Amino acid sequence: MVYRIYQPYYDRLVQDAPFLTSNGRLSEQLVDKITLQLNRVYPQILTNKEAEKFRNPKTPLQTRLTELLWHLQKKGDRDCQEFYRALQNNADQLYTTLPSRKKQKASDSTEVHSDQEKYILNDRGPAFFLTCFSVAAGLALLMYCVSPDAKVAVGTRKIVGFSALGFGRHVRNILISYMEDTSRKT
């Protein structure tokens, strides 16, 4: 499970504003789409009058965008979050390159990469596997070879009973059922 450090959307927007307002990042059509989405889907974020103001073609794009970002920052964290959602819906490529997103990805130190995952799955090595296999094979051989009539079988049942505690549910059930079967026969 990956845990991310929570960064409020307001702070993210403050961090990303210079990147978004730099020349050529957001086209006029993209700013219009985001403004319309905020106005139509969430009219409490942008009223019709505010949307017209931020879509006015007589005002330079940089000014409109700066005013839109400032307006959202004044409104609060939820409104900034909706801006990010609109940006992701309309320009996913740009959304993934935001400075705040890069910072979040860098802070995910617990995330396992797919190349590393192959080698991390069993970090105990082949000796551990051979030991476990040898114990299981030895117990199986012991249970198979010892007859239930012999006096040694009592000691064997105790060993098998205690060793069942260290195994998983399925193996434990098999060992316990074997002990019950052999105790009924004697």
Image: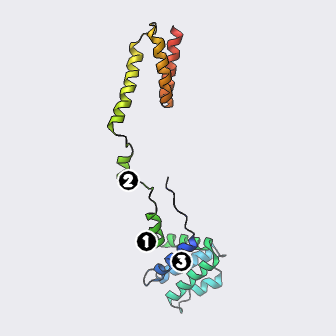
Residue 97 numbered tag: 1
Where, by quadrant of the figure, is residue 96 drawn? bottom left
**Residue at position x 53%, y 84% in the image:** 65
Q: In this view, does 182 lie to the left or right of 45?
A: left
The disc labelled 2 sits on which kind of residue?
Ser
Please tell me how crowded label 1 is: few (under 14), some (14-19), or many (20+) other residues with Cα within 10 Å.
few
Q: Do the residues labelled 1 and 3 touch (CB within 8 Å)?
A: no
Do we see residue 100 in this rendering?
yes
Judging depth in this view, the residue of 154 and 71 nearest the camera is 154
Q: Are marks 3 and 2 in contact (CB under 8 Å)?
A: no
Residue at 46%, 60% in the rendered image: 108
Classify residue 50 as left or right of residue 140: right
Q: Residue at x 44, y 58 (%)?
A: 109
Residue 83 visible in this rendered orientation of the protein: no
Between disc 1 and disc 3, whose residue precedes? 3
Give the image location of residue 100, x and y in percent: 48, 71
Q: What residue type is labelled 3?
A: Val
Tell me, yes or no, whether the two marked residues, 1 and 2, touch with CB atoms within 8 Å: no
- Circle 3 SS class: helix
Question: Closer to the N terminus: mark 1 or mark 2?
Answer: 1
- How far is the residue under mark 1 from the one under mark 3? 16 Å
Q: How many numbered circles does the render carry?
A: 3
The circle drawn on residue 14 is: 3
Q: Is the residue marked by circle 3 packed among few (<14), some (14-19), or many (20+) residues within 10 Å?
A: some
Residue designated by label 2: 114
Q: Closer to the camera: disc 3 or disc 2?
A: 3
Residue 44 lies, with reference to residue 174, above or below; the image says below
Q: Report x, y in % for residue 9.
A: 56, 71
